[in-house]
Image (cartoon, rainbow, N blue to C red):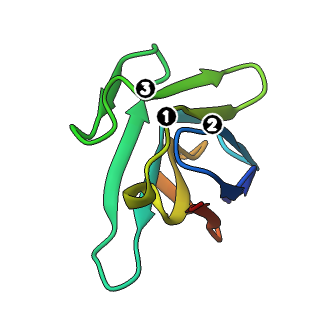
Amino acid sequence: QLQVVESGGGLVQPGGSLRLSCAASGHIFSINAMGWHRQALGKQRELVAIITRGGTTNYADSVKGRFTISRDNAKNTVYLQMNNLKPEDTAVYYCNAEGLSYSGSFREAWGQGTQVTVSS
C-alpha cells in the first residue's frame, strides 16, 4: 500500500511564506508523480503543483512565480515552498502520490490535508 503524510500548514500573514512537506511510504515498487492540490471552503479541489520522478513540474496559473515544488526521491518526500502568500491561497492542501506496486498495479494515495490560512 502507498501512504502519504503532510505537514507544515498554519496561519501566515499576506506576503508571508510557508513550506509544506509530504512523505510517502509503503510497500511500493516506485513512486512516480507527486503533487499538491487544494480545496477552499465552498470550492472544488484544484491542482496546485505536480512533479514527476524526473523533476518535470507543472503549476496552476494562480501560483506560478510564487510557489515552488521540489522532491527528494531518496526520501520519497515532496515539498511545496509558498512565497508571497495571498488570502485567496487559504485552503486545505492535500498531498497526492502515484506509484506502481511490485505486481505492476497502479497505486494512488491522498493525505489527510493540512490547513493553510492567509490572513492579517
Query: Gap between marks 2 and 1, in whole Å?
Result: 6 Å
Q: Amino acid at mark 2?
A: Ser
Q: Is residue 39 above or below residue 63?
A: below
Determine if residue 105 is in view. Answer: no
Q: Is residue 111 above or below residue 85?
A: below
Determine if residue 24 is in view. Answer: yes
Query: Gap between marks 3 and 1, in whole Å?
Result: 25 Å
Q: Earlier in the sequence, mark 3 or mark 2?
A: 2
| Left or right of 98 on screen, residue 111 | right
The quarter of the picture where residue 2 lies is bottom right
The quarter of the picture where residue 42 lies is bottom left
Residue at numbered disc 2: 17
Q: Amino acid at mark 1?
A: Asn
Q: Nearer the viewer, residue 108 or 15?
A: 15
Furthest toward the front, the residue is: 120
Residue at numbered disc 1: 84
Callout 3: few (<14), some (14-19), or many (20+) C-alpha neighbours within 10 Å?
Answer: some
What SS does tag 3 mark?
Answer: loop
Residue at numbered disc 3: 52
Q: x and y percent of residue 117 in the render?
A: 59, 64
Q: Earlier in the sequence, mark 3 or mark 1?
A: 3
